[in-house]
Amino acid sequence: MKKAVCAAVAAVLAVSMLTACVGGGNGNELSVEEPDMWTTQTQPEEVTSPKQMESETQLRNGLAATGNAPEEKLAFYEELLARDLCNEEDYLEMAQLYADSGDAVAQRRMLWWAFRLYPDEKYVHLLQDLAVRYTSEEDAAAALVTALQQALTQKDGGALRSVTEGEDWREAFQEAPELFATRTCYESENLKAQIESDGYETEVYLLAADGTCLYGRINDAGSLIASAVFSESAYNGDAEACWYDREGTLYKRYQAVLDKDICVNSLSVEYEGVTYAGTLGEDGSIMEEQQEKVTQAGGVVYAYEVGGRRYLYQEGASRDTFRMDCETLGLPRLEIWE
């Protein structure tokens, strides 16, 4: 009897377990018509990287969602740029973002591309006023400035031309030269350089910590290499300016003393192998005897051949108003770029 009861209980338990497994119950029991609650559902990944976005609309929407996050905004703009989807406003915005990040080279490039696509005088002014800054930590810029310094110190017009006409120079200092002059500043522990370069002419100033200034100008006609002392925002002290033709041959050399950019006391000139000398007042005025035919032609004699009769004169000048100064020698007044 006991065995029969046990068998019946076992049968009931078996039926109950089977019912629980195959469904039909209520409460927390599983149904064959319901999904398996333990199965992990695979959701499509949300696309957040600009490179993964397929359309311009997605990129623009993503850009709008970045808010004021500069790096994220640049990532979207750069993807638009890579797909050639940028408009004028995009180039300007990228230029500003690069400027804010301290990347003046990229800033200049964006302004240049904007100018090429949307010609406007405002871009010319922006580009001409922009100075890219390098330090001695940039190896390419440091090597070029070192080569410049050597050429200017040695008064080697040919070497100066070789440096400024090289491919490395164009990449570092002369972007888009056919349309505007690019400005570059360089600074090391003991030297500052200011470089302005375009497709026609390059000007460089090298200013040492002790005030020694080297200047170079080179164009299709020839080159000029000068040295002076810069102090108290002007040239003061001995100065020399050497003029070379296109082949690098020296044809004119000025030597003078400058006082606040004005040539004073005396002047020595070597011109086409002949040496000339001139006497000047403390204000740069001409003290030499004038030649009537030069005066009648509207000129001023400023130096006579040493031991001879020939003379040098300045056209379009009056003795009463003409003053010998640094610019007469060929050395422009130096303006330090901030």
Image (spheres, rainbow, N blue to C red):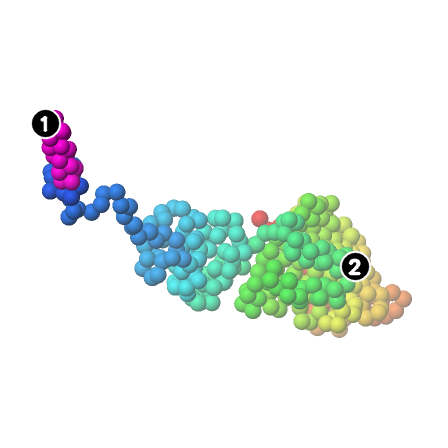
* Residue 286 percent location from the top left of the image: 76, 60
Spatial CA span between label 1 and label 2? 125 Å
* Residue 39 percent location from the top left of the image: 27, 45
Q: Is residue 161 left or right of residue 19?
A: right
Image quadrant where one finds the N terminus: top left
Asked if residue 13 is among those painted magenta in the image, a careful observer would answer: yes
Eyeballing the image, is 104 above or below 120? above
Name the residue nearer the viewer: 279 or 208.
Answer: 208
Eyeballing the image, is 261 above or below 294? above
- Pointer 2: what residue? 154
> Dot 1: what SS?
loop
| Disc 1 versus disc 2: nearer the observer | 1
Eyeballing the image, is 205 above or below 271? above
Q: Main secondary structure of the magenta part?
A: helix
Residue in the image at 47% along x and 64% along y:
113
* Residue 257 percent location from the top left of the image: 77, 53
Amino acid, disc 2: Gln
Q: Earlier in the sequence, mark 1 or mark 2?
A: 1
> Dot 2: what SS?
loop
Q: Which residues lie in the magenta part?
A: 2-20
Mark 1 touches mark 2? (CB < 8 Å): no
Residue in the image at 77% along x and 61% along y:
155
